[in-house]
Image: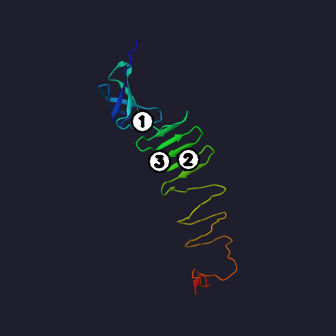
């Protein structure tokens, strides 16, 4: 069977419809408008190319009514990647997932907040404002040592099976502290005045 020639044209994206199983779009170039054209991308990569993205349109089997367009926006791409590196980028915001040759993965949002999974196995989360970890049931952190640098606010019960070390520990209610002792002397409040009774009322 003889195959017809496949026409290849450089095109510019006008619009994309990403609501159906097959992405379609309108592209223009070489004095022509292709409408619709099927928009294709590599396996596993989902995107909705913005207007003015560069497209390469192929007429399948030379049939002008049966075409696909491969799209990129090369001037907005993440540049200076090393050989073998891969990045997934939102060209409009700059948010990206950067997979590096040293084995690390760097996830960066438009605000500059990052999650860095280093090649040595360490993970660093850096937020540009308040950083929250939310769980609908239980959030567990298991490690030989947990270091908290700064003021620690606990809303709810604080239960520890190991030692808690702090330069200052303030709480509205302490139900029990295992082996909690004070040095010998007279109890005083913040005035400082001597304290008597089980409630610690100053006198």
Q: Quadrant of the N terminus?
A: top left
Label 1: how many residues lie within 10 Å, few (<14), some (14-19) or many (20+)?
few
Q: How many marks?
A: 3
**Relative height, residue 164 to residue 8 (above, below):** below
Residue 29 visible in the shown view: yes
**Relative height, residue 107 to residue 82 (above, below):** below
Mark carried by residue 126: none
Which type of secondary structure does the marked residue at label 2 adopt?
strand
Residue beneath disc 1:
75
Along the viewing direction, whichever of 161 and 73 lies nearer the viewer: 73
Specify the farthest residue to the front.
Answer: 80
Q: Quadrant of residue 188?
A: bottom right
Specify the farthest residue to the top.
Answer: 1
Along the viewing direction, whichever of 172 and 88 lies nearer the viewer: 88
Residue beneath disc 2:
116
Gap between marks 2 and 3 measured at Cα: 12 Å
Q: Quadrant of residue 55?
A: top left
**Residue 179 in the image, given as x and y percentages of width and height:** 69, 71
Mark carried by residue 109: 3
Along the viewing direction, whichever of 54 and 36 lies nearer the viewer: 54
**Residue 101 in the image, given as x and y percentages of width and height:** 58, 37
Q: Nearer the viewer, mark 1 or mark 3?
A: 1
Q: Are marks 2 and 3 in contact (CB under 8 Å)?
A: no
x 45%, y 37%: residue = 77
């Amino acid at each position: 069977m003889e195959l017809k020639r496949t026409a290849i044209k450089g095109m510019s994206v006008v619009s994309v419809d990403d609501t159906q199983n097959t992405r379609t779009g309108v592209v223009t170039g070489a004095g022509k408008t292709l409408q619709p054209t099927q928009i294709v991308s590599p396996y596993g990569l989902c995107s909705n190319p913005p207007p003015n993205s560069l497209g390469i349109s192929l007429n399948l089997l030379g049939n002008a009514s049966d075409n696909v367009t491969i799209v990129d926006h090369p001037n907005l791409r993440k540049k200076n990647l090393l050989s073998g590196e891969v990045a997934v980028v939102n060209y409009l915001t700059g948010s990206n997932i950067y997979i590096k040759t040293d084995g690390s993965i760097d996830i960066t949002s438009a605000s500059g907040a990052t999650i860095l999974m280093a090649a040595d196995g360490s993970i660093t989360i850096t937020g540009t404002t308040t950083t929250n970890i939310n769980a609908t049931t239980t959030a567990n952190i298991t490690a030989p040592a947990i270091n908290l640098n700064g003021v620690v606010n606990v809303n709810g019960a604080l239960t520890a099976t190991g030692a808690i070390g702090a330069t200052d520990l303030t709480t509205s209610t302490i139900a029990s502290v295992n082996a909690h002792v004070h040095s010998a002397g007279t109890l005083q409040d913040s005035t400082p005045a001597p304290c008597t009774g089980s409630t610690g009322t100053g006198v």
